[in-house]
Amino acid sequence: MRDAMLGLGKAPAAPPADTLATDFTRALADFDACRYASLAVRLPRLIRAGHAHTPGGTEDDYKRLAMSYLLATRMLVKLDEQQLGWMAADRARQFAEAAGDVLAVAESARQLAVLARKAGWHGEALSIALSAADHPDLRDAGRAGAAVRGLLVQSAAYTVARRGDRDGMRELTDEAAAIAKELGGATLVRDHGGGFSPLTVQLHRISAENYAGDPLAALAAARSISLRALPSVERRSRALSDVAVTYDRLGRRSDCIRTLLAAEHCAPQETHARPATKSLISSLLVSGPTSTELRGLAVRSGVLA
């Protein structure tokens, strides 16, 4: 991915636009299904090919490259590769603006807010998310625009949670929930952050309550979610990982390990690759008695040799 973003290596011949559209659909499906080994091949190739199309390209060419960079940003954030994440998110913003794609511009702002939050720049992260949510163009973009606005408000809530402001987090999360309720029960903007619906707001609430310091509220939010109803394997795995963190904070060690194993069963490549999950596994190894199951998980995740 780094070489593709830096333009290193032999540039490919530009494939037809319809082939690129199909390749992006497959890359998004790989991400949603946590098929990261496949995505690691497909996504850099998609970005190289996208750049081959953009000199003098159409709005569709720029939009497709923006969406490819947004998908790359989501993966890089997941892997805690912040330097490349910043580059990918900024390129997504530039290509989205070139395409005149209001939704992709807003989603690139959300990803920049995520990266700012991870860097500890909470004030900047909050400003980026809320400014994008209030942009007039987004408010004029219909139901999809409202859904992306909900995702931005949700991101702002998570940033407030990181600052320990439980009341502010709940106020913003309730605002996102109200937007989702107005839009009905369907999952909208599936290719933006995993989609937006009342269910995905509840999923967000698990980690937000954890970071705001109330794991019991996080567990209550988790119990209101049907894993099967979540829109992708990636979202189900994320839910299980968040529940495992909740159990760890409540001191429920055996439930934490059981939930991590369930997450691995759901999406092994996600569980084995994500640094946050590997860190939790490492802490479990040193904080209490180990078991065959825990040690096996640690080996498969590369935590133990």
Image: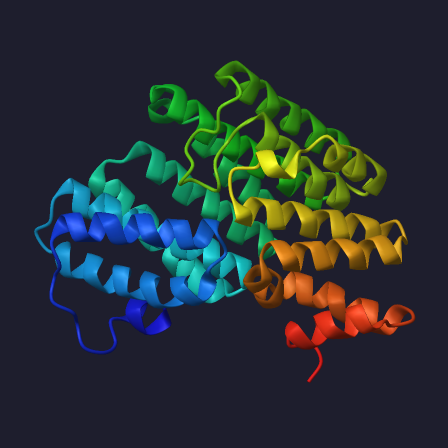
Residue 259: x and y, percent?
A: 75, 53
Residue 153 in the image: above or below residue 28: above
Residue 247: x and y, percent?
A: 83, 50
Give the residue displayed 82% in from the left and 67% down from the top: 284
Residue 79 in the image: above or below residue 242: below
Residue 215: x and y, percent?
A: 82, 42
- Nearer to me, 166 or 188: 188
Question: Would residue 209 be found to the left or right of residue 159 on screen?
Answer: right
The residue sitting at the left extreme is 56
Q: Judge whether residue 89 can be spotted in this image.
A: no
Quadrant hosting residue 221: top right
* Way the structure is coloured: rainbow
Q: Where the N terminus falls, by quadrant?
A: bottom left
Residue 141: x and y, percent?
A: 34, 22
Give the residue displayed 33% in from the left and 52% down from the top: 26
Give the residue displayed 63% in from the left and 42% down from the top: 159
Question: Would residue 33 be found to the left or right of residue 138 on screen?
Answer: right
Circle count: 0
Residue 175 in the image: above or below residue 225: above
Q: Where the C terminus falls, by quadrant?
A: bottom right
Question: Would residue 45 be found to the left or right of residue 285 on screen?
Answer: left
The residue sitting at the bottom extreme is 305
Q: Judge whether residue 149 can be spotted in this image.
A: yes
Give the residue displayed 26% in from the left and 41% down from the top: 97
